[in-house]
Image (cartoon, rainbow, N blue to C red):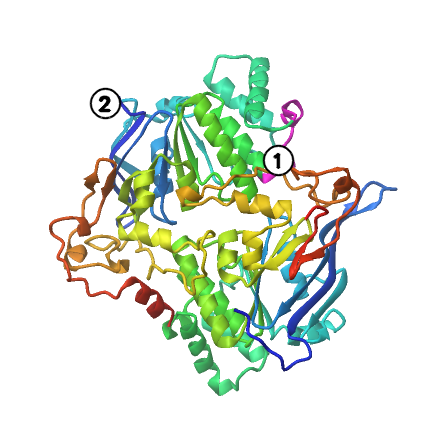
Amino acid sequence: MTQPLLEVKNLKVSFAGKKKTTNIVAGLSFNVEKGKTLCIVGESGCGKSITSLSVMGLLPKTGEVDGEILLKGENLTGKTMKQMSKIRGNQISMIFQEPMTSLNPVQTVGKQIAETIILHQDVTKKEARQKAIEMLQLVGIPSPEKRIDAYPHELSGGMRQRVMIAIALSCNPELLIADEPTTALDVTIQAQILDLMKNLQKELEMGIIMITHDLAVVSEMADKVLVMYAGKAVEYGDRKSIFNHPMHPYTQGLMKCIPDVDAEDDLEELFVIKGSVPSPDAMPVGCRFADRCPYAQEICRTKSPDLEQVDSQHTVSCWKYTDLWKDGETNEPAISEVAVSKSS
Amino acid sequence: MSQPLAKLPSANLLDVKDLKKYFPVGDQGFFGEKQVVKALDGITFTLKKGETLGIVGESGCGKSTMGRAILRLHEPSSGTIFYDGKDITKISRRQMRDNRKDMQIIFQDPYGSLNPRITVGAMLSEIVETHKIVPRKELYDYVCNLLVEVGLSEQHYHRFPHEFSGGQRQRVSIARALCTNPKLIVCDEAVSALDVSVQSQILNLLQRLKKEHQLTYLFISHDLSVVKHVSDRVAVMYLGKMVELADKKDLYENPLHPYTKALLSAIPSTKEEKIRERIILKGDVPSPINVPSGCRFHTRCPLATDRCRAEEPAFREVSENHFAACHYA
């Protein structure tokens, strides 16, 4: 097997507080291959953004990273700030959610793109400007020679996100991390941006980590999917396998609670995952989803499950798929009753 | 799911005619013309009792302005709004304030719309007191009941907004809207800021309250799947105008306006077999200061002709109860 572009092994991130340390990410492993997309899905607070920031080496100082982050076999966790800033931009780039706050409002977009190019490549200002125009052209901004001297506020949301992508791609990174790149955009613009990212990926053969909470976006973009819940991976595998046979009760719940545009009949009520995400200070001992899980048994509340291989393309962290599962012990109400009891 | 109500001469709770809202944006030089943003440029629709009308459109299309103009939180520039047979654009602000007892709004960001410095109980009590809904003695019980009704509990009475999670805060917002026993609630992106698992909880809550209190919703959202789930009828807006209005089923299965078609095709789907033939619109929404001539959508429309560039299409009934503003619908 060839070496994957990025290999993350047992990543743990914790933040030291005054009294205690809070674990945000607890043992996460995944791979990203060249030219492929990994989507990390999860709700707010599940640690998906922290994961991406630790790959970038951009965690705040109070954050502590444990485990291995291997970029083409090279471990990034031990790198100094200086070494990391050479890698960032050149080999790994990132697009953030809010293009207005991540662009400098008092500089023209051209200058901001050229800055990255000058920093990482040995070029003159003139060449950098020329390259910046090319980049704007690449991301589909009309009349780039004019737009290059525009300030961020003169551009629309979709255009700003294109500029962000242009900056991120200006040094041909091998890995692009996109943190909710389309969440702030309208559907028609979202379709444009996703389309653009797919085309650029084909052209430049980069690996993409896409972080999102939108399952529909995942199904359009992903080759592989990692579902996170409360700092842990609950399911990891091939997109097809996960969407056709979601195995973890959390993944199943997530898929069911979105209203389906294609549904023939109207549902009276949507499926509900009862309760809410546990606070990172008070994580349950056993499976972190146990309190909200309709199937939870004794073992789920006492012991934390590991990620188990269910087939070659699919791993899941749930006791239900192990030998320790006792059939018939589930005394929780069936799914439909859960929804009703919640709302009555 | 609309309930037939024949008691009144018209079953329309809300009758909006040619509603306009222009915002001035300063002069263009000394001799220049005054510029205005045409946030709403002639909106006409009716809302039946017990119905949910979904409003969809991209950001800047005027959907939120419309929600606020109907409650006169923005004074409309022109047009009429008949609420329960009474023209509320003609009444004084004071009378309007009394009227708002019947018309409430839920905002997108529950943190921004709750006062962070007073407890939830105090905030709700204040509203109930102002509108004299119940005698003072019953105030506490009334508010507690309300909290239970939206899925919170009595203990939450003495808590501050920051002690709640996003979903709980939105429940408080719903309680706030509900505490005056309104008939109409405008939900302005009420579930957009929530995680999907919480979103489904809140949507179910809204649906249940609608049934129990015979509410009428004007449901504003950019999320087409959510709108399809909650609405009876759906209106699509583009640059301050309605471009299509129809029964939910009709609109989603048989869209007539090219913009609606493009919007629907842009929804990503989780079902592999249902990947749509995508119509990718070019460019962005034009500025509402310089609205394009003729049909507003012609700059992005894949089917635009010379007629579209010159002549503005009327919002007409193309088939029964299915309105669209397109020359070629």
Mark 1 closeness class: few <14, some 14–19, many ≥20 residues within 10 Å? few
Over which residues does the magenta segment extend? Answer: A143-157
Q: Which residue is mark 1?
A: B282
- Drawn side of residue B32 relative to residue B103, left or right: right
Q: Position of residue B280 (x, y in %)?
A: 57, 37
* Circle on res. A176: none
Residue B221 belongs to magenta span: no
Instruction: State the image coordinates of residue B57 (x, y, percent, origin top left).
Output: 60, 50
Instruction: Pinpoint residue B153: horizontal percent, then vertical percent.
Output: 37, 72
- Image-quadrant location for residue A110: top right
Comparing B307 with A207, the one in front is B307
Residue B105 x/y as whole percent: 57, 65
Asked if both marks, 2 and 1, belong to the same chain, the answer given is: no
Question: What separation in Å lies between label 2 and label 1 (alpha carbons)?
Answer: 42 Å
Q: Chain of mark 1?
A: B
Instruction: Let me know if residue B118 appears in the view.
Output: no
Q: Secondary structure at mark 1?
A: loop
For badge 2, the amino acid type reads Met
Looking at the image, is A108 positioned above or below residue B243?
Answer: above
Q: Is residue A310 left or right of residue B13?
A: left
Identify the residue shown where x is 11% and y is 52%. A324
Residue A154 colored in magenta in the image: yes
Amino acid on which disc 1 is placed: Lys
Q: Is residue A269 visible?
A: yes
- Which residue in the structure is indicated by mark 2? A1
* Quadrant in which residue A257 is drawn: bottom left
User: Label 2: few (<14), some or many (≥20) within 10 Å?
Assistant: few
Question: What chain is tagged by disc 2?
Answer: A
Q: Is residue B189 left or right of residue B65?
A: left
